[in-house]
Image: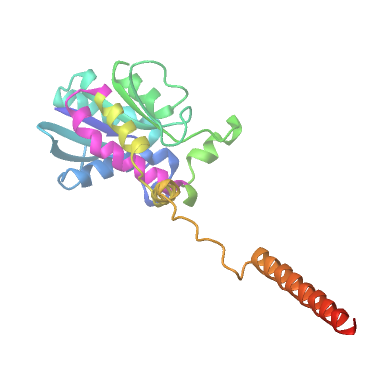
Amino acid sequence: MKLFVGLGNPGEKHSANRHNIGFLALDRIAERHGFGPWRKKFQGLVSEGTIGSNRVLLLKPETYMNESGRSVGEAQRFLKIPISDVYVFHDELDLAPGKVKVKAGGGNAGHNGLRSISAHLDNDYKRVRLGIGHPGSKDAVVYYVLNDFAKSERGWLSDLLDAVSDAAPFLAKGDDARFLSDIAKTLYSEPRSEAAARKSKDAAEDDAPRPAKKPASTSHPSGERASKRQSALAENLKKWLGARKSSDDDA
């Protein structure tokens, strides 16, 4: 069995925070793969199901971010799940929005949820780092992560959550590399948003053969000018011939 942990803070007011992208990822996985209802256990909410041929327990700790390790440690020890089969989905400031990386162990980069888990488990669990971007200033980080995703971010966020849930079968069987490559293929090789679809359509139209141009009609300004010049020449010729005939008659 694999243990998928999503990090976030409980309560409606935090549900759309950037810090809660781990919760959002697990919600999308549960929905996409037909998991059972969420129920209270291990100081959090759990849902059980199968992804591909692998049993997976989803866990959303309700201990608040800074104490996530209490919930994760309790679940891991009770179920006797190897540390290497624990995957923690969390927000990552050091990745551009929509980017995903997976790593085992390493530092916690100031993330209090990861710090708490490392204190209750060994450090070798897997981290599924979901990029949310950095606000640009260290002083702005707390405000940034504890506020909701902006409307302008919801397109890439939904695409990311879909891609993660679609690629989850590879993560469930321990193929981290295929999980990442499948996400990259989905997000960057196929138009996911309406804007991307429109861009693709416009590009196709630009590449389409153009119909041949029709020849200029006599109503074109240049045609009108040529016609006027011809009329003037004919009129002058007519006057000249008239003058010659009059001269011959007088002679």
Residue 171 on image: x %, y %: 22, 28
Q: Nearer the viewer, residue 50 or 124?
A: 50
Q: Is residue 63 visible?
A: no
Range of the magenta residues?
Answer: 153-177
Q: Residue furthest right?
A: 251
Identified at 50% across, 61% down, the residue is 214
Identified at 37% across, 48% down, the residue is 11
Q: Quadrant of the N terminus?
A: top left
Q: Residue furthest left?
A: 53
Residue 197 on image: x %, y %: 38, 49
Q: Nearer the viewer, residue 140 or 161?
A: 161
23 to 232, vertically: above or below: above
Residue 24 on image: x %, y %: 33, 43
Q: Is residue 115 magenta?
A: no
Q: Quadrant of the C terminus?
A: bottom right
Q: Is residue 177 visible?
A: yes
Identified at 53% across, 33% down, the residue is 134
Identified at 56% across, 36% down, the residue is 135
Give the image quarter of residue 176: top left
Give the image quarter of residue 164: top left
